[in-house]
Image (spheres, rainbow, N blue to C red):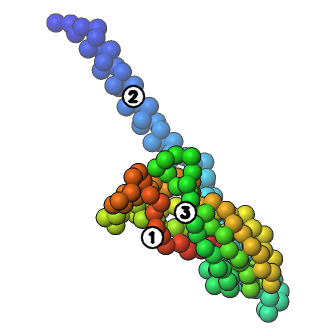
Amino acid sequence: MTMPIDVVLLFGGIAVILALFAFAVWVLFFTPLIRWCFYGIIYAGFSYLAVQVLSLPFKRTNFDPKVDVRMLPEETLAKTDVQFVTQVGPVQGAEQFALNVSGTITNRSDRVIQRIRVWCRVEKMSSGNSEFASDWLEVVVRPGETKEFSGRISGYLTGIIKAGFRGMQPPERRFCRLDELG
């Protein structure tokens, strides 16, 4: 009894695939070149980490312990005085409104502030649901300066339904904060 050619080709193909897999495993695990590459990657990673740890004091003080070269964003934010007001106004759509902000910023840090991000939570429905809006405003404030800024946070706020009014009305309740400095 002879085997059909299809079965012979199937078993032959499986045997070739297994042989190629065995060869790949042998190359990966039993040749020195791959092992050397693996060790090189490991040693390079440890060397990079060691250089980063050893250079930390120089990154932080710039050879003068009184001058701090790097300041965390939270530190800059804490040394910044911001006062702003927000207004909601209509845009071209009948049910959408724009959220605008204007105010002043005083930079009491030793870093230049190039832009600010204002984040707002705005009433969406009378049931207490909210929608969120934020945007970056370009304002360059050098250390010790006070500058005015204004801009649009969002032009796509959904209006709310109010009793006694026809159509959507601008949302009244909102909470806004200075979120980030850039």
Front in this rendered view, residue 102 or 115: 102
Residue 62 to residue 117: above or below: below
Q: CA distance from mark 2 to mark 1?
A: 67 Å
Residue 101, compared with residue 8, is above or below; it is below
The amino acid sitting under disc 3 is: Val
Residue 127 in view in this figure: yes
In terms of secondary structure, where does tag 1 sit? Answer: loop
x and y, in percent, of residue 19 in the image: 41, 31
* Residue visible at 61% across and 54% down in the picture: 36
From the viewer's perspective, is the residue at label 2 or at label 1 nearer?
1
User: Which residue in the structure is indicated by mark 3?
Assistant: 88
Measured Cα–Cα span from mark 2 to mark 3:
68 Å
Rendered location of residue 55, percent (x, y): 73, 78
Precedes in sequence: disc 3 or disc 1 = 3
In the image: residue 2, left or right of residue 107: left
Residue carrying label 1 = 173
Instruction: Name the amino acid, label 2.
Output: Ile
What's the distance in space between the residues labelled 3 and 1, CA to CA? 10 Å
Q: Nearer the viewer, residue 174 or 179?
A: 174
Residue hosting label 2: 17
Q: Position of residue 39 (x, y in %)?
A: 59, 59
Q: Residues within 10 Å of mark 3 (few under 14, many from 20)?
A: some
Residue 96 vertical placement versus 120 (above, below): above
Instruction: Please name the amino acid that badge 1 sits on.
Output: Arg
Q: Earlier in the sequence, mark 2 or mark 1?
A: 2
Instruction: Reply above or below: 74 against 5.
Output: below
How dense is the environment of label 1, judged by Cα within 10 Å: few (below 14), some, or many (20 and up)? few
Mark 2 element type? helix
Label 3's element? strand
